[in-house]
Image: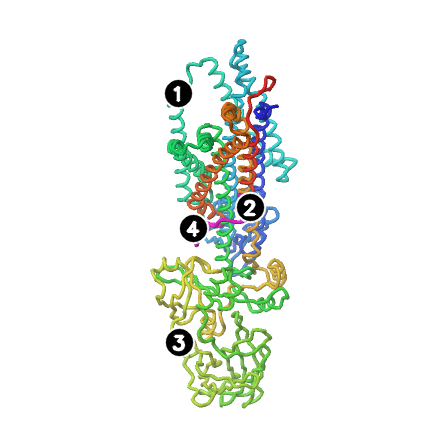
Amino acid sequence: MHFASLLPRRALEAAAGAVIAVAAFLAVLLPLQVGAAVDELARATLAAGGSVDVTLTIELPVADDVDVQDAAVRRAIDSTLGADGVGVALDVSRTGPDDGLLRWTIAPRADEISAAALEAVPAAWRRMRSALVDSGADVSQVAFSGSLVPTALTVTRQSDALRGAAPIALAVAGMIALVAVNEIARLLATRGARRSALLWSRGARVTRLVGDATLPSAVAVVVGAAVGALTGAAVAGRLPLDAAGWAAVAGAIAVVPIAVALIAGHAFAGVRRLERPDTAESPRARRAVRVVAVALLVALAGFTSWQLLLFGASPLSAEAARTNPAILLAPAAALAALSIVALLLVSLLRSPIDRAVDRRASWFSAVWTRGAFRRGAVSVTPLLLCALAVGQLIVVAGYGGSWTARYDAVASARWGTEVRMDAGGRGIDADDLAAAGALDEVTRVAPIRTTEQSLAAQSVSVLAVTAPAVAELADAPAELRRGWADIIAPRTPPGWPVAGGAMIDVALSGDGATPGTTVSAFLGNADGLVVEVGGTSAGSEATVALIAPADAGGWRLFAIDISPPATGDERGAPTVEVEVSANGERLDPAGWVVASPFSEPYPIDTGRDARLEAAILDGAPSVRFLAGPDAGPLPVVVTTAFLDATGLTLGDRFSLTLWGLDTTAVEIAAVTPAIPGADNAVAVMIDAWAPVVGSLAWSDDAPSPTAAWIGPAGAPASTAAALRRVVPEGVRIDGTAVDPARDILAAAPVAMWWGAGAAAFLALLGTAAVSLAGRAAETAEADALRRIGLDQRRRRAARAAERFAVVAVGVVVGLMAGAVVVALLVPSLARGAAPSEALGLAAPVVDTIALAWSAVSFLGALALVVAVVAWREPRAPGPGSRS
């Protein structure tokens, strides 16, 4: 058999079926995979939230009949959120009466929740008040609290962005499949023209001719769609098919009528040419149709891209959690429009290339350059397919890298570290911190203190953390977090260094040092963990021995409380003198201050005696000696949003009021897009020693930490599991390394890579089919080159150069189009990974490893296809060849 008959009609029909099989496979696989990931996201979010983020509390004054009131509230809950409402499986518990109030806590069951049910929670909550009224409850003083609704809105926005990955991936693969099927349909009509002419000459009608040309191809298309759909369901693990599986299969089967219509349309056009050979479509009309089609595509790309840049892939509004479906067409439409416009510009180079070839008068240049740009669909189709496939690989690499980078940036800003303890704002007590630090899976515990205050009519989040904790535990690039640590570190750490396990001797003297005087020492480690150790004196001139807790990094002694026993007698203002030694070395009290409940802190005049001395004011329970603060403003790190909100700039100074202290002067020393662990975008990072030491000058205790950053000894997941066993209910264990949503949301880039892989395969299949089937047109040219004496090697080289020139132009066009889409649209798409008003759009991040691997694979396969096509010489089919 001659090479020209390598692709007879049956092979073209098989190629059409294969294209449809790949399209159907993708159309079933991606929705099922993404749908499963969306449900898993809902369950994982609720399971990770525990009793912190996923409850809704209804608070009402106690009624006369508590049982009737309880029944009314439960009916309202059931009619909105429960079985008679949106169908969320709930656990409802009642507490109280407490202060004359009853509280109903509603917690969805994480193991039974679905994404659809969780997404319906906000709407059901908005109906809750009216449902309570309908149930007979008095809602005049009703109060709602809890984070169930905000959590549901966040999951809804993330689910929406996740669902959007499937149509985005399908759009480009669908376009490539459409181009390939359309060209295969044209080739089928061309191959069947001789048979159609024979039947027409024998009197066959148009319906018979179209049916004869279409029916075998339709069978191949139907079989391909069925095989592809079932294979997609099997890969997704959804056999036997459930309701969602049947819905996906039904959607995939929609490609069948489109393919059959294209095949029938080309067959009908061929029959019409037989009936009316003198009414062929004019070139001007074809050109006008193409111009209109390109204009419509460019308009669609412009509109959808504008919508995407304006609104993003996932709305940020808490009330609107739905994506405009038109936005999902933006990447595919933009890629197609850019590729086609670039191809039109390339076509304008035909005349300059011809003139350049004429001047060089080289047979080789004349053969391959004119052949590359003058073979119509045989050249244009592979060029367009390669451009779309390469462009999609670049877009997906940018999407995957940007999606992951966006989520990691938002997660870092939210949690701040790999593993974190969070009590939801109520504060973590010392026992919980000690229990965490005693675990073998934990290397360090860094308390984090956050507070909100108003500055320039803006709510500012202040995060207090020590420099070593930032340098080692913050979830940020090493260079960045070490730079933060260098900035906020105090010039002189407060207090005296004390080794872990050291003996601290506090010698008391003076008329205020009576028997039974209590001595308390406050020590802090490098991570900001504060402990208090105490003892009682046995006599008037006694030494109280204290032992510092074991800590490899050591401690700093920064405050000492002296509390004489209450006598009931007026004491006047007795004086107490304190001499402190650690392991026999006397500690210098220079720079310390005295803090009393009845006076402002004042410095100690130590003179020539290295002692702490102060008067205990009448009625005061104690006197406190405290390390003095650093002189000058404290350096702080602020966010870009802070500067935008306050109008301040780098180097400016302002004042903060920290945990009830007097105002503290600070200076902006660095600016960063986000501060890890801050509560909002307008945030300030300050060294933790300032609020800890400063608060002890005005209050009894240091401020309780609102969270704690944990240093894992091994795998973060193991550390998190160990922490969950020891922390009390209501303390949440989270962090960037133990976030279940991160891996689940990775289903979006995975879906995009499935689509890009299918698009590349379809491009290869279409290029091979079109190139091989179109070789019959090269027969006359090959014979002419043979007659003028060119040997087979040079003829093969010319054919290879022609084919490689076509695909090379397509690859270059795809590179440029993909780069433009990545730069303009991918950042807005990636924002859907973690909707956040705190972080704006970031520069796209390209997954270079995945891109390199996929590009090498595609280009290698493409080179193989081109080499196969160029290897064998086209010859006219023999008398017995089938067409």
Q: CA distance from mark 1 to mark 3?
A: 88 Å
Q: Is residue 722 magenta?
A: no
Residue 838, position as x, y percentages in the image: 43, 54
Quarter of the rendering containing residue 276:
top left
Kindly check if marks 2 and 1 are in contact, taking CB atoms under 8 A apart as contact. Answer: no
Which-is-in-front pick, marks 2 and 3? 2
Question: In the rendering, which numbered label is found on residue 853?
Answer: 2
Q: Tell me which label, 1 or 3, sits earlier in the chain.
A: 1
Q: Tell me which label, 2 or 1, sits earlier in the chain.
A: 1
Which-is-in-front pick, marks 2 and 4? 2
Please name the amino acid that badge 1 sits on. Ser
Q: Disc 3 designates what residue?
A: 631
Label 1 CA crowd tier, 10 Å (few <14, some 14–19, many 20+): few
Query: In the displayed structure, would residue 639 be above or below residue 562?
Result: above
Q: Disc 4 designates what residue?
A: 841
Please name the amino acid that badge 2 sits on. Trp
Examine the rendering and report whether any part of residue 586 can be seen: yes
Task: Report the magenta residues as a range.
Answer: 834-855
Residue 400, position as x, y percentages in the image: 51, 47
Question: As drawn, is 832 to the left or to the right of 641?
Answer: right
Q: CA distance from mark 2 to mark 1?
A: 46 Å
Task: Name the quarter where the N terminus is drawn.
Answer: top right
The local secondary structure at tag 3 comes to loop
Q: CA distance from mark 4 to mark 3?
A: 39 Å
Question: In the rendering, which numbered label is found on residue 282?
Answer: 1
The local secondary structure at tag 1 comes to loop
Residue 621, position as x, y percentages in the image: 49, 80
Query: In the displayed structure, would residue 531 be above or below residue 607?
Result: above
Q: Residue at x 58, y 38 (%)?
A: 29
Query: In the displayed structure, would residue 572 be above or below residue 881?
Result: below
Task: Name the quarter where the C terminus is drawn.
Answer: top right
